[in-house]
Amino acid sequence: MNKAKIYIFIIILVVLAVVAIKFLPLTNAMTYIDVRTDEEWNAGRIKGAVHFSLDRLESGELPDIAKDENIRVYCKSGNRAETAKAILEQAGFTSVENAGGFEDLKVKGIETE
């Protein structure tokens, strides 16, 4: 009976670890920056994201976010996000990731509004 309890305990631990790993990226440990247009932003966005269009970045304006904060930039397909990532890194932001496209993020289960 003790072996059965140990096996059940191990299975529960493995399941919990898999669930934790799956949902770890969904925590608010990162700031999402939406670099799409106003029209795209108004049609839907990642919950809690900051809207800062690529046009604003390209004009030299920067978001009011700490330069060491973990940032994930996204757009419709990931192309503008890659440009935004390069601009932010050149401006001294140290932890910037291209999160890709909005629809892809929705499919991954990222909460939207």
Image: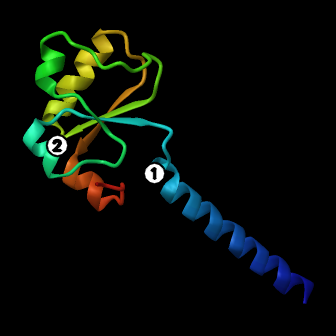
As displayed, is residue 72 above or below residue 22?
above
Q: Say left or right for 15 vs 87.
A: right
Looking at the image, which residue is at 42% across and 16% down?
67
Q: Is residue 76 visible?
A: no
Q: Position of residue 94 (x, y in %)?
A: 42, 17
Disc 2: which residue: 41
Q: Position of residue 104 (x, y in %)?
A: 24, 54
Crowd band around label 2 with a 10 angstrom C-alpha radius: few (<14), some (14–19), many (20+): many
Which residue lies most toward the bottom here? 1
Q: Position of residue 53 (x, y in %)?
A: 16, 28
Crowd band around label 1 with a 10 angstrom C-alpha radius: few (<14), some (14–19), many (20+): some
Disc 1: which residue: 26
Looking at the image, which residue is at 14% across and 34% down?
79
Secondary element at tag 1: helix
The answer to which quarter of the image holds residue 96 is top left
> Of marks 2 and 1, which one's residue comes earlier in the chain?
1
